[in-house]
Image (tube, helix red, strand yellow):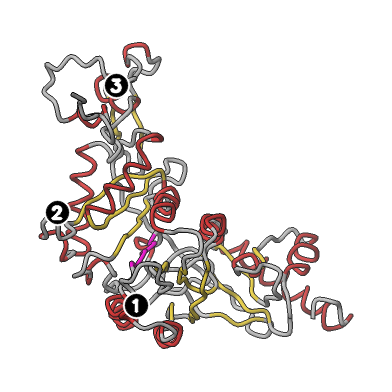
């Protein structure tokens, strides 16, 4: 008689966390925390308070944890998501797609695991155009077909999405081998690189199209906490009655980018499968959540460029007037002036296509430095116009 493998898909650290303290475990391959050189830590935060980690807490912080994350942190995060988004799925049964969460090494790890789980070679994947270069780097090796959906300063344009989807019959979505797109990816707030934020009305239209054509929405929202105006627009998660939204969040932009704290929220069956991917690479994540804010001073050089003020995030998407492609301009003239922006072409599926845009990240620069950038680009444009340089 053969015994089923009860450890298949199990996480020893997860099992031990659910067991009584009296349990003696010889199962997990965890090191003895008594051998770790770090005993305690005290971290002073803004405002003068100190976060103190005593020896027992330090041992937990440095030890392997369950693949979902430390239970106390997960519980806190679930309460946070319910408070912020009030997702309909929070009250669902597991079979119906109850809301579940797991902690990831930044939202990028979560995205990679989601793509690996959902996307097969030859699949059609819908995404904003332009979009985050890290997303393109994660998707392109999977051999899928990336379909650009046009966007403007208010994010993805539902009318363009509808026009693209009309190539298919919604009834084919459930058929084996169907080419109907199964995944839509979007950054709804402070998009990278555009800084665009999607309105509530557009999200509702996109969600209805997702219901009609039965595809999943990957809501990548690392700039959610960096929105500049209130009230904040409802999220896809907040309107998800069908358990079709996988949401990635990040504390990297408000707490510490080096800590790499991200989390996935979505239907339990899908999050469970993401966790299976994570189990081999779990690191411990034990943090206190702090408030964060960002101030922003816009650059104004309207004679040489045009842009839409972002409603969230860290990026300004700037179109340079009279410039066909910004690659040479940025990598030569701007670098000579000790100014560096990102040429817009790197955010396109075909990065060699001419692109008149640049992305400016304003989160690290002082107002004085931003003024210097403004003057530098005015000088560069004067040079271009006077010399009729090859950038045009």
Find the distance from the CA under tag 3 to the CA under tag 2: 28 Å
* Numbered circle sitting on residue 172: 1
**Labels 2 & 1 near each other (Cβ < 8 A):** no
* Numbered circle sitting on residue 28: 3
**Labels 1 & 3 near each other (Cβ < 8 A):** no
Whole-percent x, y for residue 116 in the image:
43, 52
Residue that numbered label 2 is attached to: 94
Q: Quadrant of the C terminus?
A: bottom right
Residue drawn at (22%, 68%), measured in percent from left and top? Answer: 238
Label 3 crowd (10 A; few <14 / some 14-19 / many >=20)? few
Which one is nearer the viewer's eye here, 162 or 255? 162
Find the distance from the CA under tag 2 to the CA under tag 1: 27 Å
217 in magenta = yes
Query: What range is drawn magenta here?
Result: 216-221
Total residue callouts: 3
Q: Is residue 16 visible?
A: no
Please tell me whether mark 3 sits on a helix, a strand or a loop: loop
**N-term mark: 2 or 1:** 2
């Amino acid at each position: 008689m053969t015994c089923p493998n009860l450890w298949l898909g199990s996480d020893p650290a997860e099992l031990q966390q659910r067991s009584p303290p009296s349990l003696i475990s010889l199962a997990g391959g965890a090191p003895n925390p008594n051998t770790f050189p770090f005993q305690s830590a005290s971290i002073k935060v803004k405002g003068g308070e100190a976060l103190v980690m005593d020896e027992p807490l330090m041992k937990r912080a440095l030890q392997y944890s369950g693949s979902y994350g430390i239970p106390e942190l997960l519980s806190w995060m679930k309460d946070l998501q319910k408070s912020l988004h009030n997702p309909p799925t929070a009250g669902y049964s597991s079979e119906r797609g109850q809301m579940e969460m797991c902690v990831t090494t930044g939202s990028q790890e979560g995205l990679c695991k989601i793509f690996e789980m959902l996307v097969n070679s030859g699949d059609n994947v819908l995404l904003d155009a332009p979009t985050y270069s890290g997303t393109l780097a994660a998707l392109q090796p999977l051999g899928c077909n990336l379909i650009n959906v046009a966007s403007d300063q208010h994010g993805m344009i539902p009318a363009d999405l509808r026009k693209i989807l009309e190539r298919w019959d919604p009834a084919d979505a459930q058929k084996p081998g169907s080419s109907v797109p199964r995944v839509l990816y979007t950054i709804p707030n402070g998009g990278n690189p555009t800084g665009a934020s999607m309105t509530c009305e557009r999200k509702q239209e996109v969600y209805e199209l997702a219901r009609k054509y039965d595809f999943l929405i990957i809501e990548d929202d690392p700039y959610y906490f960096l929105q500049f105006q209130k009230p904040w627009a409802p999220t896809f998660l907040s309107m998800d009655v069908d358990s079709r939204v996988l949401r990635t969040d990040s504390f990297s932009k408000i707490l510490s980018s080096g800590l790499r704290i991200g989390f996935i929220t979505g239907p339990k069956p899908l999050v469970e499968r993401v966790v299976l991917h994570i189990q081999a690479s779990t690191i411990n994540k034990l943090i206190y959540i702090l408030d964060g804010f960002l101030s922003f001073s816009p650059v104004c050089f309207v004679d040489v460029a045009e842009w839409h003020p972002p409603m969230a995030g860290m990026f300004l998407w700037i179109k340079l007037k009279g410039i066909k492609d910004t690659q040479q301009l940025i990598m030569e003239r701007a670098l000579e002036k000790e100014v560096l922006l990102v040429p817009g072409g790197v955010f396109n599926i075909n990065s060699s296509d001419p692109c008149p845009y640049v992305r400016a990240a304003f989160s690290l620069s002082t107002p004085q430095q931003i003024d210097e950038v403004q003057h530098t680009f005015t000088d560069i444009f004067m040079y271009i116009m006077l010399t009729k340089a090859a950038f045009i």
